[in-house]
Image: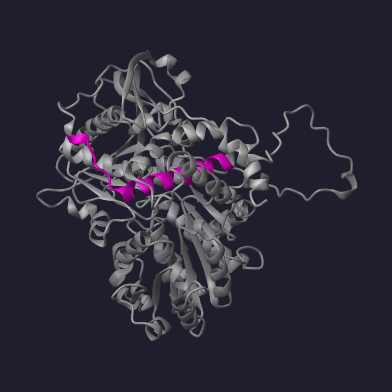
Amino acid sequence: MFNEFARYEQQFSDWRRDGYPGVKPDTYKYIDFLSDPNDDQSPKPGTLWHHQWDAFLRIVYCHEVLGKTEIGANGLLLNIVTGGGKTADIAALIAWLRIAHGVQKFVLLCPNLIVRDRLEEDFEKGKVFKDRGLLPDWSHNRPEDFPLTTLGSDKSGGWSSLFGADVVLGNIHQFYLSNTAGQSNISALMNGPEYALFNDEAHNSPAEEYDATLKRMREKIVLRIDTTATPDRADGRSPDSNMIYEYGVSDAFADRIIKTPVVYQPDIRIVQLTYTDAKTGEKRRVEEIDWAEVDRLGLTATQWVTDDEPMRQQMAIALRRLDEQERRAKGRYQPILFVIAVCKADAEKAAHTLNKFFKIRTLLVTEDSDEKDRQKARELGKEQKTANPYKAVVSVLMLREGWDVPEVSVILLLRKFSSKVYGQQVIGRGLRQVRGKKISPDEPQICAVVDHPKLEHQWLWDIFNARKRENVLIDDLFDETEDLPEPPPKQELLKPENVIDVPPPDPSIIVDKPFDLGDFEAPPEPVKNWKEVLAGLKYDTTTVEITKLEIAGVIGRELAGERWKTVHSAPEMPNGADALKVDSSDETIRDAVKETVLQMSEELTVYAGYASGFKSEVYSALIGHVRGKFLNGLSLGLAERSDLIFAWKMLPQVKSNVSAIPGLIAGIIEYGNQ
């Protein structure tokens, strides 16, 4: 997403240097209140951090100096890394708008309950205003002058309460025009005074109903501020607001306000494979192969983290890292292991393995979890103060944006990310620093991420500028108080006057003749008789399981500063594996098949060159194929348990067979309705 403010940087710099000319008197007075008495270009200690101050001033400049006709007609967007303190900026802007512009009403929108609960905790009883000292005495505004009404909680009083509320916090779905409650809530807002809108986690807003709701609210909005850490979505769509400030991972590293990620991967030498008949369970043979030869077997990426033996190895690596993090915590807090699985069946298996095999108290959170467990996940940091705290939490897509537990110190990836946005969101769960009275703000902290080379996440680590340093001794314990390198220099725009607008095309030089693109391989023609081709696919019931690994060591890579590489010894494994047997319910297996086919459909659709929105046609075709080949023609709901398990085991082969036929996915999409 393009930074729309770049063209104004020089003017903005001059404006700050010259004492903020052109602003309202109370705006100037409030800026002066937030300024450091010893340096009027910096924020007062204890209020805003430097990057929050920069973001705040850019909003003021856009709103009072440039105006909506110049920038921000649909809102202004702040792109601030997870852990960068977006909430404090929201609070400072609320205080400014009340003091300088007399705005009495503020609406905070969020995409889910996790984000809502975090914001509620920050704004309840004016907590964030108190903690950051954002309200000057001369303004006659107190923290309690910003009472919070949270929709969907016991603090909400219905239409009349929403109509007269000062700060309204709600899930965007509670304002959708497609439901009666949403229409009522919108009515309360539109019949009340003008308000400022804060759209948190704004990368969700291009969704159709989300966008429609924002447009309906527009006529009453004094100022709209969007905040997000990941504005560039996987589908290429972005919020309609103008991005005016970027504070990314490298900036936060330089300022040391987030943890430094360190990625750990196993260095595997020998792999033992067991070949089994998926239908009968008969074991056919066992083979040991060298790691360098493993690619020829076509094993799926997820097998390296979900088959029993690899999963135990990855968990052992993660628990070694957790032990290291506990030593660094020195009893001041309980570090937490966060495990990300791709489906409920894998999540249940992971939680069972940690609880029973490794004896680590683990919380499982899926879409089927009750409110009690979800609340435990939201309050996991507080839970650590009990006598028997959770040390791990396993999740399937539930704990993403907005779930902020600073004690998350180790992340174990039991899935492959195809989305850059989702990958960054997950790693972001471990970036927020632990803060407390006994923890110095200058104390370096790390987040250990346990990955696997076969998941091919190098693109994700490249976002963090990963490099290596060789020749570090085996089993060296990384001591962040001594060995953490200096952060990289912060990237800044030194010559904003050189920023230019890209000119529109000159019609005088545009010709109708097509460009010569040279020789290139044309995409395969869509297969018209795709139903026949799909039905003709043959399957070998032999499945391959990774049953033993010989690991030479574990390679750790620090993703900032000197970007060193450390080699640790292979983890030791507990004795006995009987506790690993997980008897998943029929419903769990059905969900696993459905979720896997859906994910497979999306990946195959995108790989074939189509937008992910076409995945529904592919899913319909593939789920029908699975029913015909492995479920005796029955639906997932009616199939026998043995057939469900058979289908679950055969899905990797379905994907490889379908993707091997050029034009098959294109044929399903192009001719699916014929």
| Residue 602 shown in magenta | yes
Asked whether 615 or 587 is in front, the reply is: 587
Residue at x 39%, y 21% (from the top left corner): 469
Whole-percent x and y of residue 374?
A: 27, 57
Q: Is residue 222 above or below residue 494?
A: below
- Horizontal and vertical percent position of residue 640: 35, 46
Where residue 101 appears, as percent x and y from the top left, is: 49, 76
Kindly identify the residue that appears in the image at 18 percent across and 53 percent down: 383
Residue 658, percent from left and from top: 55, 35
In this rendering, does residue 567 appear at all?
Answer: no
Front residue (pair 555, 297): 297
Of residues 571 and 436, the one nearer the viewer is: 571
Going 39% across and 80% down the picture, which residue do you hit?
165
Quadrant of res 112: bottom left
Residue 34 appears in the picture as rendered: yes
Residue 204 part of the magenta segment:
no
Residue at 56 percent across and 63 percent down: it is 208
Residue 563 horizontal side relative to residue 55, left or right = left
- Span colored in magenta: 579-605
